[in-house]
Image (cartoon, rainbow, N blue to C red):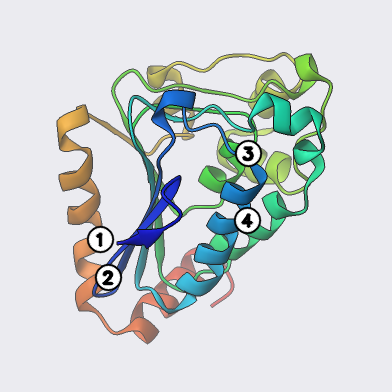
Amino acid sequence: MSGSGLVTLTRTGGLWTATLNRPDKANALTEPMLAELADIAEAAQEARVFVLTGAGKVFSAGADLAAARAGLATSPQWERLSGAIARLPGLSIAALNGTVAGGALGMVLACDIRIAVEGAGAFYPVMKLGFLPQPSDPARLAALIGPARARMILLAGAKIRTDEALDWGLFDRVVASDALQETTERLAADVLTASPDHAEAIKRLCTGTG
């Protein structure tokens, strides 16, 4: 295990797991945490499976509000992180241990699969807080759930419950909290035993770039 402590990285063979580890602050992201996550995601181009998860009961509250007001809301690190995840040749999984909010939704949207625990929700209060979403987030959100529902989240500030997120396609599967790790590992199993080229080829076919 490595990392700063606020972000930890575990590598087991081809499986890389990055964990947000600031549970006392709902895993709110600071600039150093965001930069570290981006560094990890860029290095994970060699991983077969990359997992994002969090410690505690919340995946992430998004940007630390004090840091956001000091400039984090417009940091290029957000796009560096989501872009690195989107470029991963292997499988990327967001294993949501709880609600995802604000800018943290961007890294989740960039993943291939989103698994959430019961009771997890999602919201992105950019309208209320007076910030713009990160440039790639609205398009990724609309691609998953449609433009009208994306507007409900970004413009109307809707807070999406677990059942809605699953029904809309924002979450791909909902599991009990004690089954999150097992479910994630099961989804990763076939990719971990396949050749990297085979996995990348199938992923490209799924995105229409193969």
Between disc 2 and disc 4, whose residue precedes? Answer: 4
Between disc 4 and disc 1, whose residue precedes? Answer: 4
- Residue neighbourhood size for the residue with mark 3, other residues' Cα within 10 Å, grouped as few (<14), some (14–19), many (≥20): many
Closer to the eye: label 2 or 4 = 4
- Quarter of the rendering containing residue 36: bottom right
Viewer-closest of 27 and 184:
27
Between disc 1 and disc 3, whose residue precedes? Answer: 3
**Secondary structure type for disc 1:** helix
Asked whether, in this view, residue 189 is left or right of residue 43, the answer is: left
Give the residue number, with chain letter if any, for mark 2: 191
Q: Position of residue 123 (x, y in %)?
A: 58, 22
Closer to the eye: label 4 or 1 = 4
Q: Is residue 22 above or below residue 210?
A: above
Q: Is residue 207 visible?
A: no
Give the residue number, with chain letter if any, for mark 3: 141
- CA–CA distance between discs 4 and 1? 26 Å
Q: Position of residue 91 (x, y in %)?
A: 39, 64
* Mark number, residue 35: 4
Viewer-closest of 52 and 1:
1
- Quarter of the rendering containing residue 53: top left
